[in-house]
Image: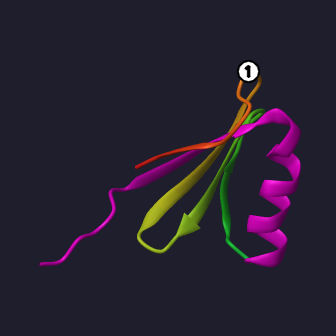
Amino acid sequence: MKIEGGNNIAIKIPKYRFKETVAFKKDILGLRLKVKEEKSFAFEFGGSTLWLDCMDNYSQQDVYG
C-alpha cells in the first residue's frame, strides 16, 4: 500500500509564531518560496505545496492536508 499526500498541505499558525515559522522553513530548511501574500506563504515541499497561513485568532497551530 502506498500513501501519498495531496497537492496542498496547509498549516494554520498563530500570529505570534508566524514570522519565526516562515523563517525556519525558508532559512533553516531551505524550502523554495513559491507564493508570498500578506498572511500566507507557499513553499515547494516535494510534490506538494506547503501553505503557511497566519491566523489572528488561533492559540495553537493546526495542520490540514
From this viewpoint, which residue is outermost toward the top? Answer: 57
Dividing the picture into quarters, in which one does residue 34 lie? bottom right
* Left or right, residue 5 beside residue 22: left
> Disc 1 residue type?
Asn
Local packing at callout 1 (Cα closer than 10 Å; few below 14, some 14-19, many 20+) is: few
Question: Residue 40, image x and y in percent?
Answer: 69, 40
Callout 1: helix, strand or loop?
loop
Q: Which residues are magenta?
A: 1-29
Dividing the picture into quarters, in which one does residue 44 lie? bottom right
Quadrant in which the N terminus appears: bottom left
Report which residue position mark 1 lands on.
57
Residue 65 in magenta? no
In this orientation, which residue lies closer to the viewer: 57 or 26? 57
* Left or right, residue 25 beside residue 52: right
Question: Residue 6, image x and y in percent?
Answer: 32, 57
Residue 22 in magenta? yes
Residue at 68% from the left image edge and 72% from the top image edge: 31
